[in-house]
Each structure stands twice: as structure tokens, then as C-alpha cells.
Amino acid sequence: MNQNIAHAVFFRYLAPEFFIIFAPQNQKFMTQNICPNYQSCRLVNLDSFPVGESEKQTYLQNWCLRDEAGWSRCKRYITREELGFCPDFVFPDSNWSTREIMDKFDEEEV
Ligand code: SF4
């Protein structure tokens, strides 16, 4: 038994309280269970974002604080992946195409 396995067995079975405290964190696993954009998304972090509180909570539950199967379907996430940014008029369940979003954004900028 190599040393790493021996340590793993010790911490997992003989000292489970140490396993809980010192077990290595799997950063990738943790971040995949929340949207990668969560810390910077304006819908989540901007108090003045144009969305009601109950609607925002629904978005958080159904998209942001989910595994990849949830947040990867969010239109805000998809738009940011494709354009590098996401305008505030786009919501997780918006049905606009990326082209339509660009056109609307251009209209609002004029
Ligand atoms: S609204 Fe979309 S892009 Fe923003 S944090 Fe939630 S899932 Fe991610």
C-alpha cells in the first residue's frame, strides 16, 4: 500500500473527523454546482437590475445555483459566452437569438 493510500485510509476510516476537516476540496466539482458567472453576473449582484425579487429568486434556483445542466441553459450565460458580455434586458429564460440580442443592443445604444 503506497503512502497516499495509507493516509487516505487512515483519515477516512480511522479518523473521520480529520477527514471532514482536512479532506482536499475538489474546486472544479464545487464551481460546477454554481454558475461560473455567479460572482460577476449583474442579475445576481446588481441591486438595481430590472427584475422583481421573487422572479430573481426563481432564476437563482432554476439556473444560477444549479449544476451545469441548469446554468449552461441560461440565456445570459450563453450570451456572455458568445458575445463576451450580456445586456441587462436578457434574462435566463429569454428566447431571443444572439443576433436579435445584438440588434436590440445596437438599437438601445443609438
Ligand atoms: S443569470 Fe445566468 S449567467 Fe447569471 S449567474 Fe445566473 S445562470 Fe449564471
Image: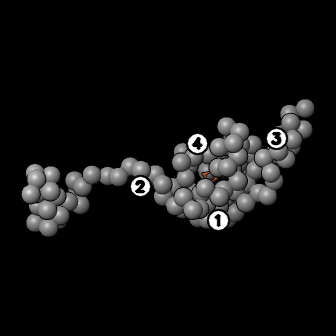
Please indicate, yes or no, whether residue 78 appears anywhere in the rendered image.
Answer: yes
Q: Nearer the viewer, residue 103 or 62?
A: 103
Amino acid type of the residue tagged 2 in the rendering = Phe
- Residue 46 appears left or right of 39: right
Mark 3 or mark 2: name the one nearer the start of the chain: 2
Q: Residue at horizontal 14%, vertical 62%?
A: 9
Amino acid type of the residue tagged 1 in the rendering = Thr
Q: Nearer the viewer, residue 83 or 94?
A: 83
Q: Residue at horizontal 57%, vertical 46%?
A: 37
Mark 4 or mark 3: name the one nearer the start of the chain: 4
Q: CA distance from mark 3 to mark 1?
A: 26 Å
Query: Is the C-beta of the residue carrying label 4 under 8 Å from the nearest atom of ligand 1?
Result: no
Whether pointer 2 and pointer 4 mark residues with C-beta atoms closer than 8 Å, the reply is no
Sort mark 1 into few (<14), some (14-19) or many (20+) by Cα contacts within 10 Å.
few
- Residue 75 x %, y %: 70, 53
Please indicate, yes or no, whether residue 46 appears anywhere in the rendered image.
Answer: no
Sort mark 4 into few (<14), some (14-19) or many (20+) by Cα contacts within 10 Å.
few
